[in-house]
Image (cartoon, rainbow, N blue to C red):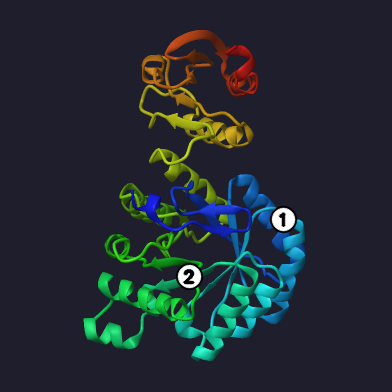
Amino acid sequence: MYRDNTKVVRIGDRAIGGGNPILIQSMTNTRTEDVAATVAQIHSLEKAGCDIIRCAVPTMEAAAALREIKKQISIPLVADIHFDYKLAIAAIEAGADKIRINPGNIGSADRVRAVVDAARERHIPIRVGVNSGSLEKEIVERDHGVTAEGIVESALRQTAVIEDMGYDNLVISIKASDVMLCTAAHKLLVDRTDHPLHVGITEAGTLLSGNIKSAIGLGLILSEGIGDTIRVSLTGDPREEVKSAKLILRTLGLRKGGIEVVSCPTCGRTKIDLIGLANQVEAMVEDIPLDIKVAVMGCVVNGPGEAKEADIGIAGGKGEGLLIKKGEIVRKVPEDELLFVLREELLHWNDRCL
């Protein structure tokens, strides 16, 4: 597994690389200058399962705000910097646990060195981020467009700028909105570096298209043993990014914990609002710390059999439903009590399993 062989990098009180668990990142969409709103969103994201949070730092006011934000949160904070090296230094001085830059758009070597020296002084990592849309013009012209090889060349070129300054506390990120291009680039990169990798499909899109593209792209990359942190980039509520990332990791067997909800696709036998019920169950179990599978089935005909692999489940009928455990019917329940009965079972799961 490639991720077992990457260097260990510490981000705040978390460690990535070297076989450490894959961590989930997201990014705030509040104005970083608005400390109260940013802290509130970070708390919400942490509750959803976010391990590392990134904030945009477009102004000196935003950089200064990081100091107060840091005091009020408990997960590592990454400062996202573009173009202005002074913002990077200010963010580091304000207590950022990591900074994200592209040395190519920071400016002269002296400016990059000033950022590297500040990071070195405080022992914080630098994430070198290269996107398919930010490749050097010469590479794009030479290759007649964006290629996986060009993305990797750019990333290693930018990484070398910092390495040549005697600093290797680095994380690399290469992203593209083209899923297969992004996958190919990662497969090339892992054979040429041992720095940990942050993985994601950039500009993936809305909740629907973004989730599909991210699931396919991250699935392909992570299943190759590549990736130390991930972000599902969605045009929407950042909490959806975290929920999707958790599900992708769990589906790939790379993370345990949390209730997995499975449900049937509905058919002509369905006598209840299965779609609404399944959504209610999925929302209900978010705050229940169990590592089990819950089934939500639409009829009593196939429900028990289809739910055999689940630890517990409910199956709807006309005016009533079934409570099922390991494929065995436990009891009948009035339809309007199904959700309540299921929640009670889950809340007392450990007691009843003793």
Q: Which mark is residue 73?
A: 1
* Residue 210 location (% of width, % of height): 42, 57
Q: Residue at x 65, y 45 (%)?
A: 47
Q: Residue at x 55, y 67 (%)?
A: 125
Q: Nearer the viewer, residue 85 or 317?
A: 85
The crowd level at tag 2 (other Cα within 10 Å; few <14, some 14-19, many 20+) is: some
Q: Quadrant of residue 172?
A: bottom left
Residue 68 in sight in this render: yes
Give the alpha-carbon distance from disc 2 to disc 1, as whole Å. 27 Å
Q: Nearer the viewer, residue 291 or 187?
A: 187
| Residue under label 2 | 168
Q: Quadrant of residue 59?
A: bottom right
* Residue 238 location (% of width, % of height): 57, 56
Q: Nearer the viewer, residue 288 or 119?
A: 119
Q: Nearer the viewer, residue 232 or 198?
A: 198
Q: Quadrant of residue 254?
A: top left
Q: How many marks?
A: 2
* Residue 287 location (% of width, % of height): 63, 35
Secondary structure under tag 1 reads loop
* Residue 325 location (% of width, % of height): 48, 14
Q: Residue at x 67, y 70 (%)?
A: 31
Residue 58 in sight in this render: no
What amino acid is at disc 1? Answer: Ile
Q: Residue lying farthest front?
A: 166
User: Would you place residue 302 above or below residue 71 in this image?
Assistant: above
What amino acid is at disc 2? Answer: Asp
Secondary structure under tag 2 reads loop
The crowd level at tag 1 (other Cα within 10 Å; few <14, some 14-19, many 20+) is: some
